[in-house]
Image: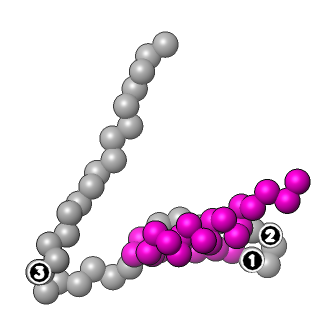
Amino acid sequence: MKNENDFVQIKVADRNSTKSVPPTKAFQMRINDQKTIVVYNRIQSYILDALLKAVLRDDA
């Protein structure tokens, strides 16, 4: 069994830079025929955590 690593490119932004990068779509998830969640790359972690807990709760 071959162990392969996945590499992800990380870009560190200069906070003093005057260049503003617009938010881009990070991922999209369809809940049902009428509801779709779109998450953008500048979402705060606590908001993403609350969103995922609400959507992926265990109703078993």
Q: State the separation of the CA atoms marked 3 and 2.
A: 42 Å
Specify whether residue 25 is in view: no
Residue drawn where x is 53% and y is 70% of the image? 48
Q: Nearer the viewer, residue 29 or 49?
A: 49
The answer to if 38 sits in the magenta stretch is yes
Q: Position of residue 59 (x, y in %)?
A: 85, 59
Neighbour class for label 3 at 10 Å: few (<14), some, many (≥20)? Answer: few
Task: Residue at 33%, 47% (x, y): give it.
Answer: 8
Dot 3 amino acid type = Asn
Q: Quick one: label 1, few (<14), some, or many (20+) residues within 10 Å?
A: few
Residue contact between numbered discs 1 and 2, judged by CB atoms under 8 Å: yes
In the image, 4 versus 45, the foreground residue is 45
Q: Mark 2 = which residue?
A: 32
- Mark 2 is on which residue type? Asn
Residue range of the region highlighted in magenta in the rendering: 36-60
From the top left corner, tell me how far across and down residue 24 is, in percent. Answer: 41, 75
Where residue 33 sits in the image (x, y, percent)? 81, 73
Query: What is the distance, in whole Å, between disc 3 and disc 1 at their CAs?
Result: 38 Å
- In the displayed structure, 22 sits above or below 48; it is below
Instruction: Mark 3 or mark 1: name the one nearer the start of the chain.
Output: 3
Residue under numbered circle 3:
16
Q: Which residue, given by chain and number where applicable, does mark 1 sit on?
A: 35
Circle 3: element type: loop
Q: Is residue 47 above or below residue 1?
A: below
